[in-house]
Image (cartoon, grey):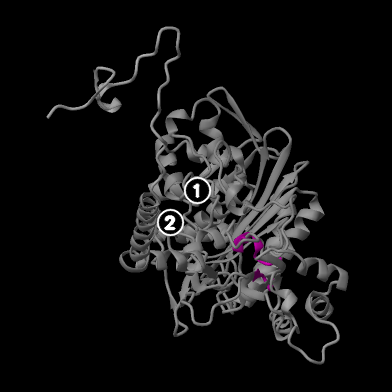
Amino acid sequence: MTSPRRNGRKNTPRSAAGPRRPRSGGTLRVRLPEARLGEPSTRHRLLVCLIMVAVLALSGRLVWVQGLDASARAEEAVAQRTVTRTIPALRGEITDRNGTVLASSVQRYDLWVNQMQVDEYLATSKTAEVTGIDAAAAALAPVLGWTVEETEEALTGDAGFSYLQKNVEPEVRDAAMSLRIPGIGADPVADRIYPAGSVGGNVLGWVGADGTALGGTELSFDEELRGTDGKTTYERGAQGQIIPTGKQETTPAVDGSDVVLTIDRDLQWKAQQIVAGAVEQWGGTGGSAVVYNAKTGEVLSLAEYPSYDPNSTREDDFLGNRSISNVFEPGSTGKLFTLAAAIEEGTVTPETQYEIPYEQWFDGHRVKDSHQHPDQQLTLAGVLKNSSNVGTVQISETLTPEVRYDYLKAFGLGEKTGVELPGESAGLVHPASEWTGRTRYTTAFGQGYSVNALQMVSAVGTFANDGVRVQPSLIAGTKQADGTVRPLGEPESTRVVSSETADTMQQLMDNSVDDENSSAAVPGYAVAGKTGTAQVGDSTYTASFIGFAPADDPEIVVGVFVFGLNTFISGNKAAAPAFSELTTFALQNQGIAPTGVAGRELENEWGEQ
């Protein structure tokens, strides 16, 4: 059966036959597809996926923080709120040989405030009319010695920590803490005090405001004195308060050891008074006074003027120690070493005779005595008693310069004594090969080389100790818990001359001092000694006297030195009277009784007089 036709054409659907062609002169019409509506279920699924990813990420981080990384985070949090404060150790005491305290540390406190907590003061009180900062300022002002306005200003702000007052006494700290003001605290500190003031200041040294040792024994023995600081660690809250249940640890401080000096406080005080009087009387620029035990090497006094008070040093204070740092030519006291060397070498005796003019030429170099005099006929003993430069050079010419140089070094000159103080100068003794021209002769009578005061007293002490020089020491040792003193070691000893030579030198020095009429005489005691005067450059002079008593059985050696004299003033005039006064006091202070042996007089002249 055939399909019906229309107008003779096959009846085909348009969708199958394609678009209808426009008729000639007509317009093409195209039917577009209809718009599709969105699928809500698709968007929902995408949003849910994104949310799930975020949740998984947060959950993973939470698991990491609270589980796998919990300990690290907890430690970090603890570290951020943990505070460590130092507990300072108290410095050990410095005492004299008898236990008298010369330097000590006392407990003091630094008061501080956490300003963010002060407003809580009396906040829970039901009776207080004024609370907070106003009330705290009113209560704290009388304790600090401030006005209420000043105190209120110091308590106001947002500082977690600031100092209120430093170095307050325990009574002030206790009064402040008894008010129980939130945010007010106190840290223990130490304050260094020197009960004897300027007595021994040049030996003790001093410490700075921060406790740093800056001079003297304080610096030399800082390791023993300073101790070991402790510390306290605690956790604090957001406003700086201590968390009671938090971590708290305390390591206590270990206080320093006590150091015991060899000096005697009373003797040191007297020596400072005497040397100050001599310097002021004769117009010097300074002075030193040394008292030394020749047998033990202990320095019983190392005094000087001007000195300083370690409690309150000033910018214009000389904070060193002239007795070991200032060097000078010894002058006539140096003649002792020339005579001792010649006697030890056997080239002379006390009776050896000399013709002594006022001046004499040696290889083209003029040497003269300090005062005009006619020609003299003197023994070696007389040369020393008259302090003749000409006679001393004659004696020195029996030795080579090399031998004399070796003896000067053996007496400890040109070398540091090793005393336990900073800033010591070794002085200067040139080798004999450099003793050219006039120096060959001036070194015989104490010129052409330099020394310090302690060196000279130690060297002369050789004659008082059987010919053995003992290294000086200022430190007896450190005090132990049971009160005993642990020595720091035995002082070094050096035999310089024989016992016989030392005894001869004692006689010669005894002969030089008139125990009745000399300005260096000590009532009731035989005294041995020697004056010295030397020019410093072209302008000033140093006068000195060094001696010991009792002359026949000596224990202590005393030296007095006056520096910076504007004119020539002999040691017999400027230093000997001070020596007499200081030696008298030192003998009594040390309980050294007279031996009852009279002073020795030797033959000082020869021939017809």
Query: Is 153 left, or right, of 256 in this rendering?
Result: right
Q: Residues within 10 Å of mark 2 (few under 14, many from 20)?
A: many
Q: Which one is in front, 170 or 97?
A: 170
At 48% from the left and 30% from the top, the residue drawn is: 435
The percent position of residue 328, horizontal first and vertical second, equals 61, 43
Magenta-colored span? 192-207
Q: Give the label on residue 501, or none.
A: 2
Q: Looking at this rendering, what residue extends furthest in the left direction? A: 1
Residue 606 on image: x %, y %:
57, 48
Among the two numbered marks 1 and 2 on one chain, the one whose residue lies closer to the N terminus: 1
Quickly name the residue at label 1: 337
Q: Is residue 247 left or right of residue 204?
A: left
User: In terms of depth relative to the viewer, which is nearer, 135 or 397?
Assistant: 135
Where is residue 278, by image quadrant?
bottom right
Question: Residue 238 magenta-drawn?
Answer: no
Judge whether residue 606 can be spotted in this image.
no
Task: Residue 535 in the image: state x and y as whole percent.
Answer: 68, 39
Q: Quadrant of the N terminus?
A: top left
Closest to the observer: 270 or 391? Answer: 270
